[in-house]
Amino acid sequence: TKTLLSGASGFIAAHILQKLLARGDTVVATVRSQSKADFIAGKYENEVKTGQLSFAIVPDISVLGAFDDAVTEDLDVVVHTASPFHHNITDPDKDILLPAINGTKSMLEAVYKYGKNVTRLVITSSFAAIVDPFKPTTPDVVYTEESWSPLTLEQGRKDKNCTYRASKTVAEQTAWQFLKDHPDAKFSITTVNPPFVWGPILNDISVGNLNTSNEVLYKVLTGKLGPESKFPVAFFVDVRDVAMAHVLAADPSNKEIANKRLFVNGGHFNLELVATIMRKLFPNEKRIDPNFGSTDIETVRKNSPSYDNSATTKLLKFDYIPLEKCIKDFVEQVYTLEKS
Ligand code: NDP
C-alpha cells in the first residue's frame, strides 16, 4: 500500500507514521519544511534509504491547491491529519479556519483530480465536530457517531473560544459534502473523531513546547492548572489508540469502515481525576496543586455528558488504553525529558 500522510510532524501523525511503516506501507509524508523532514528522516534512516519513506514539502495548507504536487497517481490511500490546533489566535481566519477548511478542500480536490488510484481518504476530524457546546454537561446528553456540533464558520470568526471547534466542524462538513457533490469519486472517506488526545511523544517537541492537548496534562502535573480552571472536554483517548484507528481506516480492503465517523473514546476524565491518578502513581510529585480533591470515575461520569460509541467499537474491535496507563506513560517520558 502506498500512503500519503499529511502533517507528519504532528503529535498524532508521528504515531500514525510509526504504525504505517511497521505495517509495511510505503509512505510519503508531507511536512512544512525541510528541517521537519530531516528530523523524521533521522528516526527512520533505514526506511528512507530503502525508499519506504519519502517526503513532500507543503509549506502552507491554507493555499488552495496546496496538495496538487504531493498527490500522485500511484497512491492507494491518503491520511489527512494536518490542521492547526492551538489557542494563539490573532486572526481566526488566517490562524485556524483557513488552514483547517482549505487544507481539507485542497486534499479532497487533489485526490479527486490526481489520485486516480486512491480508494480511501482518512481525515482526522475531532470530537469538536461532535460536541454541542450549548448543551448541558449532564449524563442525559449522549454523544454518538451521529452527533454534530452546531457551530458555524461565522461563530468561529466571531468568538475565539469557538474558532478551533468551528474549524473542525466546517472542515469535516466540507469533506462529506464533497462526496455528495462528486458521486463519481473513486474514494471513500473515513473520519476519526477523537476527544482530548494524550500520551507519549514521538515528534520533535520538548516539555517547554508541548502540543496543545499534552500541555494540559503537563500543567496539571506542574501545578499550572488547578481546580478552579473549568475544562470544556469530558473525554480523553490515548494517542496510540487514535493512531491505530487511523491505520485500520487506512486499509481499503476494510470495506465496513468506509464512509464512517470513528468516535474513538478512552473514557471520561476531569482535571481532578487526572490529579488523583497522578498523585497515586507518582507520590513524590510535589508540584500538583494541593487544592485538588480526590475523585473517581463514577463521580466524574455523574457530572458529565455520556457517550455511546458502540458503532465505532464494532468496527475497530480493540480495547482502549486506560487513563492510568496513558498518564503513567506520559509522565514517565516527561521526567526523562525534564532531566535532559
Ligand atoms: P499538532 O499541532 O502536533 O499537529 C498539527 C499538524 O498540522 C502539524 O503537523 C502541523 O505542522 C500541521 N499544520 C498546522 N497548521 C498548518 C498549516 N497552516 N500548514 C501546514 N501544516 C499545518 O497537533 P495534533 O497532532 O494534536 O493534531 C493533529 C490532528 O488531530 C489535527 O487535525 C487536530 O485537529 C486533530 N485532533 C487533535 C486532538 C488532540 O487532542 N490532540 C483531538 C482531536 C483532533 P507543524 O508541525 O509544522 O506545525
Image: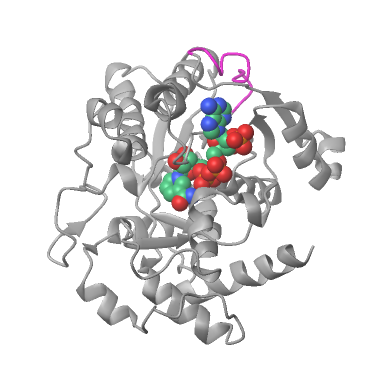
For the C terminus, give its image quadrant.
bottom right
Q: Nearer the viewer, residue 73 or 272?
A: 272
| Badge count | 0
Left of 170 or right of it: where is 331? Answer: right
Which residue occupies the foreground of this view, 302 or 322? Answer: 302
Residue 298 image offset from top left, x and y in percent: 27, 81
Q: Nearer the viewer, residue 37 or 183?
A: 37
Verify whether residue 70 appears in magenta: yes
Q: Position of residue 50 (x, y in %)?
A: 85, 37
Q: Quadrant of residue 185?
A: top left
The x, y position of residue 216, in whole percent, is 48, 59
Q: Residue at x 74, y 68 (%)?
A: 336
Q: Main secondary structure of the magenta part?
A: loop
Residue 77 shows in this picture? no
**Residue shown at 24%/54% (left/top)?**
144
- Asked which colour scheme the image uses, the reply is one colour
Magenta stretch in the rendered image: 64-75
Residue displayed at 63% across by 22% down: 58
Whether 243 is drawn above or below 337: the answer is above
Magenta-span inclusion, residue 79:
no
Say whether residue 318 is visible.
Answer: yes
Q: Residue 67 falls in which quadrant of the image?
A: top right
Q: Nearer the viewer, residue 161 or 26?
A: 161
Q: Quadrant of the N terminus?
A: top right
* Relative side of 335 to 78, left or right: right
Rendered location of residue 134, percent (x, y) = 16, 48
Apparent side of residue 24 relative to residue 88 in the rendered image (left or right): right
Q: Is residue 273 above or below residue 310?
A: below
Compared to residue 168, the image places residue 200 above or below, namely: below
